[in-house]
Amino acid sequence: MIKLIFASLIAVSLIQAKELNTQMQEFMNTLKIEAKKQNLNFKEFSYARGEKIFTTERIGKKGKLISCVSCHTNYLSKSGRNEHTNKVIEPLSPSANAERFTVVKDVKKWLRRNFNDVYVREGSAQEKGDVVTFIINKK
């Protein structure tokens, strides 16, 4: 029975990380372990929770109503524009931009910065995993 549960967890993890390289899969597994430590009821990362985090507007660090969509747009396969610097942001979707979600160090940096810009705090492990799950699976 334990082997069946373990195999199921691995299969779900692989489905969620279908477009991620080995290092990113390890990062997602690390986030999952941390999320379980932070919340004993945590089961899996959620596309729906990630979408809500990504699209919900908040008063950001500059005192302005903002969401992830403000810069990245609802169309993750298209370029966006940074609200503060006006710089072009390359597509966030890995299917449109092969460079996305390939370097763990960069993903950590941008998750930290973007959560701070929008939510004025660092995201939890569950929130980060949910957002990555949403982005890599958004059609």
Image (cartoon, grey):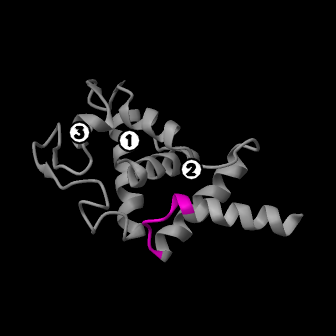
The kind of residue on which mark 3 rests is Thr
Camera-nearest residue between 65 and 98: 98
- Residue lying farthest right? 1
Picture disc at residue 116: 1
Q: Is residue 48 magenta?
A: no
Among the 4 quarters of the image, the one containing residue 83:
top left
Question: Between disc 1 and disc 2, whose residue precedes?
Answer: 1
Q: Tell me which segment is drawn in magenta.
A: 15-21
| Mark closest to the chain's N terminus, 1 or 3 | 3
In the image: residue 91, left or right of residue 114: left
Residue occupying the point 76% across, 44% down: 40
> Residue 23, image x and y in percent?
48, 74
Q: Are marks 3 and 2 in contact (CB under 8 Å)?
A: no
Q: Mark 1 and mark 2: span between their CA atoms? A: 14 Å
Pick whichever of labels 3 and 2 is earlier in the sequence.
3
Q: CA separation, marks 3 and 2?
A: 23 Å
Q: Which mark is residue 125?
A: 2
Q: For the residues carrying marks 3 and 2, which lies nearer the camera in this image?
A: 3
